[in-house]
Image: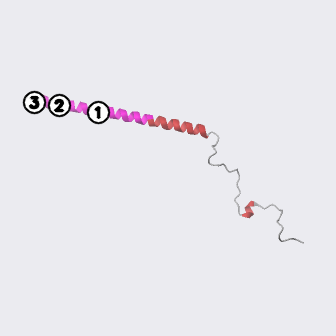
Amino acid sequence: MTDPNRQNDEPVNPAQAGEPVVSKAYVMPDDPEPGSVEALAKEAADARDKMLRTLARWRNLRKRTSREVADARVYGITGFCARRA
């Protein structure tokens, strides 16, 4: 006779129990993936290089613009003075 209070000793198929079947072990988000440190270091170095190059371009643009403004002022003054003489 079977006892209704006794638990079933047969293994339960997870697909039948309503739980998803996972093919590989879950990795916590805090655990780094293999090679991720090197990849992040390379990405940081690339971003730093890009930032420094952009900063250098802006500095060069600023210098070039101020030089062009000074040249335009000198040219304007010399043109005005040449007509007066």
Instruction: Name the colour scheme.
Output: secondary structure
Dot 1 lies on which element?
Answer: helix
Q: Residue at x 18, y 32 (%)?
A: 76
Per the rendered image, the range of residues in magenta is 52-81
Res 77 label: 2
The mark lying in front, picked from 1 and 3, is: 1
Q: Amino acid at mark 2?
A: Ile
The residue most toward the right is: 1
Res 84 label: 3
Which residue in the protein does label 1 denote? 66
Dot 3 lies on which element?
Answer: helix
Q: What is the x, y in percent for residue 70?
A: 25, 31
Q: Residue at x 58, y 39 (%)?
A: 39
Between 46 and 83, the one lying in front of the other is: 46
Closer to the chain start, of discs 1 and 3, is 1
Measured along the vertical axis of the image, is residue 5 above or below residue 53? below
Measured along the vertical axis of the image, is residue 20 above or below residue 5? above
Q: Residue at x 52, y 35 (%)?
A: 45
Res 41 label: none
Name the quadrant of the C terminus.
top left
Q: CA distance from mark 3 to mark 2?
A: 11 Å
Between 61 and 1, the one lying in front of the other is: 1
Classed neighbour count for the residue bearing mark 2: other residues with Cα under 10 Å, few (<14), some (14–19), many (≥20): few
Q: What is the x, y in percent for residue 12?
A: 78, 62
